[in-house]
Image (cartoon, rainbow, N blue to C red):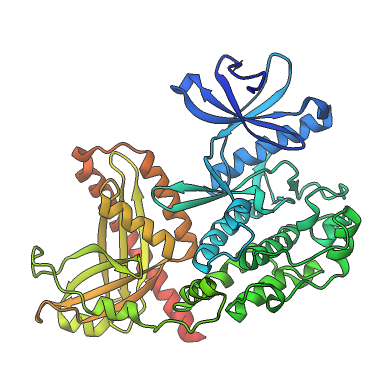
Amino acid sequence: MRDEYYGRLLVQRYQLLEIAGKGSMGQVYQAKDTLLGGVIVAVKFLSRSKINQRVRDRFMREATISALLGEKSIHIVKVRDYGVDDEEMPFYVMEFLKGESLKEAMQNKPMPLPKFFSFMRQICLGLQCAHDGIEIDGNVTQVVHRDIKPSNIIIIKDATLGELVKVLDFGIALLKSDDSPTGFMGTPAYCSPEQMDGKTLDNRADIYSLGIMMFQMLTGELPLKPKASSFEGWFQSHHYQTPKSFSEVKARLDLPPALMDIVNQCMAKTAVQRPSSVTEVLNVLTQIEQVPDRSAAFSNSLVSNEVRPAPQTNTIEAICLQSVWPKDKPRAEIVFPQLIEHQNTELATMWIMLSRSEIEKYRNNKPHAQFLFVGAPHPMLLWLTTLYQTEQQHRMLPCYLDLKKPIGEKTLQVLTQTGSYRLILFALEGDERCVCTIEGKVPLRKIQLLKEWSLESQNSPATHGQIKESKRSLKEELESLKPKLVASLQRQISKKNLN
């Protein structure tokens, strides 16, 4: 049976279609934006039974917080409009996200580690944005979500990222400028002890909820089991019950000890015992993820619920060393991107031909990645890798990616997903075989930028006649950047030497 509001036109613009979701505070409709060619959006209404001035104010604040955060991070749902209908009922308009919630994706069973790390990285980036704060009336104010749980995380298919994860529902979010207790609000199964007490909260309340959710993602079970599924039951569990250990869960898991440690730290009963920021959590997860082949070992162990040995390491190195210089490329000092298949995934690589003396000079050095982007007139990315010894001895390797070509688009996607790359080096004086490889990492702050540029490029038109103009702009920006980049690298090297 169709909803009574089906086909209703809001403010002469949004035509309501079917109900997309319901909650305690109201409901969300799928709608057409008739002003913009019928693009599908989501419209959230307040429930008539809940309406009063306090709820109206909170609803408008939810829209404002989401709008400001959505502009800062691709991992938070974007709000596009706010208004009231002809019956004075407030509503706001969001991007329509067709996907599944994290609750649906988990299916009450352990999640493979590669997927866990990918989802958690994106969730942490969204939360990090909220905790860093938004500017209201000239002041930056931190935002505590207060309702982090699987049903408030949505996963949507994305052509560039594969799966894009977004944090939803800032309906009970707390602005840290509100420094007085507000009473209990939240979902009891995921709330911190101090939140159950109705105390003043900071970002560590969200970190506790994150810990509960991580345990559930890794095991398929909640870490706490109250005697009764009531507020009092959960209150007692969060305050006094010791969370399950990973060894107590039904599935036999082969998890890195460091991963279990960070999850347990997040679930500490007192806020001071938890990580101080979601950035700290993200950094630890990134370090764990980069340990070779742990993720694959965990995925294999889930097949039969038995712990299996990790596969042989260094397979990436072995595959890269088998690379042969393409016959259609000149033997010259050139640089170009290439994707290499590895264990059903792809690795972003930069193929480089240099003199043998230069290769020997830099082969043991850590590369430094820098990225520049122009979205118009044609979306292009400059992937700049610098090999550095001293201010006088460094080599910059610029690689231009046309983001409207499959190789450019896919290379950017792999860089954002893996956060790593390989330099494949060939000698001018040698044969066609690879001489050596050098592993590089993309810093987390740059991964976020790459994701935003990737989405922007998808929405930009392809103007192939303007490729040279975009490339020229990038070259000019690179020339102005070079002195600053060399000085920055010199400071980093000096600081490491002092330590």
Q: Position of residue 235 (x, y in %)?
A: 88, 59
For the N terminus, the quadrant is: top right
Q: Of residues 467 and 495, which is closer to you in this image?
A: 467
Residue 142, visible in the rendered structure: yes
In percent of width and height, residue 391 lies at: 32, 76
Left or right of 434 in this view: 148: right
Quadrant in the picture for residue 459: top left
Residue at the far right in the pictured view: 232
Numbered label tally: 0
Relative to 20, 391 lies left or right: left
The residue that appears at 73% across and 46% down in the rendered structure is 173
- Which of the 4 image quadrants contains residue 359? bottom left
Residue sitting at 56 percent across and 19 percent down? 15
Q: Outermost residue toward the front?
A: 304
Q: Is residue 300 left or right of residue 344?
A: right
Does residue 393 appear anywhere in the picture?
no
Q: Residue at x 71, y 24 (%)?
A: 90
Residue at horizontal 35 percent and vertical 70 percent from the top: 343
Q: Residue 463, relative to residue 105: is it above or below?
A: above
Image spot of residue 63 (x, y percent): 66, 35
Q: Is residue 179 above or below residue 15?
A: below
Foreground pick, 335 / 459: 459
Question: Quick check: 249 left or right of 224?
Answer: left
User: Where in the figure is residue 431, as x and y percent of width and height?
Assistant: 9, 80
Please tell me which residue lies in front, 422 or 246: 246
